[in-house]
Image (cartoon, helix red, strand yellow):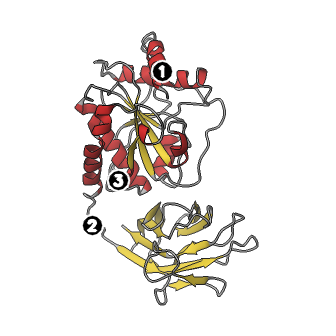
């Protein structure tokens, strides 16, 4: 939002009454190493339905963008105020900006309340394989999660309750999507704006450090195994898969590549010896090149049947990318497949897969 839009938003917000408290959307348990904080969904704060369906990207974001609302630095830290703020933001975005829904994926109030902004943002982050496309940071919209933070921080310091919630929410987002803490930005990094205010912007290094501390507190896994494309007896692929060391983002000495194929899968398979039937995290490593395939099918053989995920291999390469958590049966078998069966152009890449618990 522009600074003018944010000020106009506040003029409308102060005229709003306190609505129904609604229902809280909360997590009953920690999701992995970084627990899900209490996040109030769109149903809780009484959101209007989007004017048209929200768009899912089909891939993960690689950054988080921090905003401020440029509204008054209220001392009303109540949940009812938080709900009213979320409604006023959505109304402004839909009625004045002409957007289909709230522009940002999440909102955090000065009282530390975290609210879902655009519909389905909470649903998709919990799965961790794609995200809802927002309208909040220009060219960064297609690769980022946007968080609006209540208040004006051009010269004022955000309350500690807000900063703590920013850290908790951003750490959770980074954990679910495999985003490094270095990829936390301010709105002004992508557009000509004062947002998120000079003070909050100067606090971003501190926020990055605190998020990194939460991410690095991950306890050692009770099981971890890596299969590379060179792992003897664990990786199999047909002669249609070539060998390349072109990209320095590769895992190990080289990686496999193949042209997409619209008739059959011709998959490259990764075999693991799963010690016990349980839920495991599955990560994939691939080098990212702008011309590589943007919709590569990756299949996981789970206890509830094969699950397929599309991976954009033109971005987010050179690191472990989490595909999600899946129920895997005990045994020594082919667990993960990278398939050629896609109509999208560009080489399909099979490099390395990691499974951990």
Residue 116 position (above or below residue 327): above
N-terminal of the pair, mark 2 or mark 3, is 3
Distance from disc 1 to disc 2, alpha carbons, whole Å, reads 48 Å
Mark 2 sits on what residue?
220
The residue closer to the viewer here, 174 or 222, is 174
Element type at mark 2: loop
Question: What's the residue at 41%, 26% (across, down)?
Answer: 69
N-terminal of the pair, mark 3 or mark 1, is 1
Structural crowding at the residue carrying mark 2, measured as other residues with C-alpha within 10 Å and reported as few (<14), some (14–19) or many (≥20) = few
Q: Quadrant of residue 241?
A: bottom right
**Residue 253: assigned label:** none
Distance from disc 2 to disc 3, alpha carbons, whole Å, reads 22 Å
Pinpoint residue 53: horizontal percent, then vertical percent. Answer: 65, 37
Mark 3 sits on what residue?
182
Element type at mark 1: helix
Question: What's the residue at 47%, 68% (across, down)?
Answer: 284
Pinpoint residue 293: horizontal percent, then vertical percent. Answer: 62, 66
Q: Are marks 1 and 2 in contact (CB under 8 Å)?
A: no
**Residue 4: assigned label:** 1
Q: Which tag is nearer the camera, tag 2 or tag 3?
A: 3
Pinpoint residue 229: horizontal percent, then vertical percent. Answer: 50, 82
Left or right: residue 156 versus residue 17 is left
Element type at mark 3: helix
Left or right: residue 77 versus residue 344 is left
The residue closer to the viewer here, 201 or 353, is 201
Structural crowding at the residue carrying mark 1, measured as other residues with C-alpha within 10 Å and reported as few (<14), some (14–19) or many (≥20) = few
The residue closer to the viewer here, 159 or 138, is 138
Structural crowding at the residue carrying mark 3, measured as other residues with C-alpha within 10 Å and reported as few (<14), some (14–19) or many (≥20) = some
């Amino acid at each position: 939002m522009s600074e003018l839009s944010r000020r106009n938003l506040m003029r409308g917000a102060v005229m709003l009454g306190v609505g129904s408290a609604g229902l809280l959307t909360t997590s009953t348990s920690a999701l992995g190493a970084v627990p899900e904080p209490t996040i109030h969904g769109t149903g809780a704060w009484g959101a209007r339905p989007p004017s048209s369906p929200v768009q899912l990207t089909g891939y993960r974001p690689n950054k988080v963008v921090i905003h401020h609302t440029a509204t008054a630095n209220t001392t009303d830290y109540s949940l009812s105020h938080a709900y009213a703020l979320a409604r006023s933001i959505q109304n402004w975005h839909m009625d004045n900006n002409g957007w289909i829904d709230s522009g940002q994926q999440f909102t955090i109030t000065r009282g530390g309340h975290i609210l879902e902004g655009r519909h389905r943002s909470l649903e998709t982050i919990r799965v961790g394989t794609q995200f809802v496309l927002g309208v909040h940071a220009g060219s960064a919209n297609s690769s980022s999660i946007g968080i609006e933070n209540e208040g004006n921080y051009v010269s004022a310091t955000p309350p500690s309750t807000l900063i703590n919630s920013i850290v908790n929410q951003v750490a959770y987002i980074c954990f679910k999507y495999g985003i490094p803490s270095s990829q936390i930005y301010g709105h002004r990094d992508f557009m000509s704006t004062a947002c998120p205010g000079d003070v909050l912007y100067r606090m971003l290094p501190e926020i990055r450090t605190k998020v990194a501390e939460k991410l690095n507190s991950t306890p050692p896994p009770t099981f971890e195994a890596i299969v590379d494309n060179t792992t003897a007896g664990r990786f199999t692929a047909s002669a249609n898969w070539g060998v390349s060391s072109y990209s320095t983002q590769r895992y190990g000495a080289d990686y496999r590549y193949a042209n997409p194929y619209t008739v059959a899968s011709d998959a490259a398979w990764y075999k693991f010896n799963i010690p016990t039937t349980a839920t495991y995290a599955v990560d994939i490593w691939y080098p990212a090149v702008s011309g590589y395939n943007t919709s590569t099918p990756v299949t996981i053989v789970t206890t509830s049947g094969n699950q397929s995920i599309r991976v954009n291999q033109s971005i987010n390469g050179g690191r472990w990318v989490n595909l999600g958590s899946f129920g895997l049966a005990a045994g020594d078998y082919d667990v993960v497949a990278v398939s050629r069966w896609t109509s999208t152009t560009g080489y399909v890449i099979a490099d390395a897969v990691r499974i951990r618990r």
